[in-house]
Amino acid sequence: MSTAEPASWFVYVLINSTGVSYTGIAKDVAARLKKHNAGNGARFTRGRGPWTILHMEGPMTHGDALRREIVIKKDAHFKAHLKERMPAPAPLSPFLSDAATLPSVPGAYVLLVELHRETPVQLPGRPSIALPAGRYLYCGSARGPGGIKARVGRHMRPDKTVRWHIDQLTTAGQVLGAWIFPNGDECALAARLDAFPAPIAGFGSSDCPTCRSHLLAWPQNAPQFPPWSAPVDSSPQTGIAARSVSPDSSGTRRLTTTADPGPSKAMRDKT
Ligand SMILES: [Zn+2]
């Protein structure tokens, strides 16, 4: 191996929704992933997608990448270990959608909310911001009576008075589920999601010294689940959604428009 050889290659392991993995090398893994998902990345991956990135190593030289690729392809134990660390193969499975199944204990949660259309959101004393349609992750905590069950259950009810910042999203869009962390801390969860864009500074976090926002956008091209290999402070409760959320329960509801005076002064940011 020449020392002059540039270290610009990555070894990657992809996985599909049935748990099948594929190992390859590329200089631009994101571009190669697109090719795999378009059906022209490799014969093996064609027609078996969509694929997501399970693991990446590098950068390294082309020679080292080829050698590492061969090692990983033969190492079933290593690949099994990677799959174990993965929260779940399906995009929504860590998110519980049935409030009745949640525990009445204090803790934190990541709420997954889908906006079906552009939605105006306003924090008190600030100009309205139009959130584009898409999926959002909100980090909150539940320390009151009824704990996580009561708090997340309220988030999932479309009919409610807008009281918290997040209520503007949950009344306009649809809560797809909650990933819960008994005894967890919402700021630690927000910190773990630091790679995701924060469309509204201070959302849910105006008294947090370190958090940019407790609301993060979950872009289409981002990993299909938050990139956590280990939970924060406590173990995540994972499981397949017990029931699907009715699409007509809240998806077409509209938030009060920006012509209104805006959220009441009583609206608070922390939940
Ligand atoms: Zn915070």
Image (cartoon, rainbow, N blue to C red):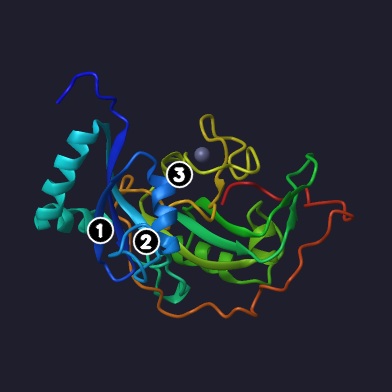
Q: Residue at x 33, y 45 (%)?
A: 232
Against 33, residue 98 (above or below) is: below
Residue carrying label 1:
22
Q: Residue at x 53, y 29 (%)?
A: 209
User: Is residue 44 visible to us here?
Assistant: yes
Against 108, residue 56 (above or below) is: above
Q: Position of residue 33 (x, y in %)?
A: 40, 53
Residue carrying label 3:
193
Number of marks in picture: 3
**Would you identify the image quadrant in which residue 38 lies?**
bottom left
Q: Position of residue 83 (x, y in %)?
A: 23, 58
Give the structural element (helix, strand or loop) at label 2: strand
Q: CA distance from mark 1 to mark 2?
A: 9 Å
Crowding at dot 3, Cα within 10 Å, few <14 / some 14-19 / many 20+, comes out as: many
Crowding at dot 2, Cα within 10 Å, few <14 / some 14-19 / many 20+, comes out as: many
Q: CA distance from mark 3 to mark 1?
A: 26 Å
- Kind of residue indicated by mark 3: Leu
Q: Position of residue 2 (x, y in %)?
A: 17, 22
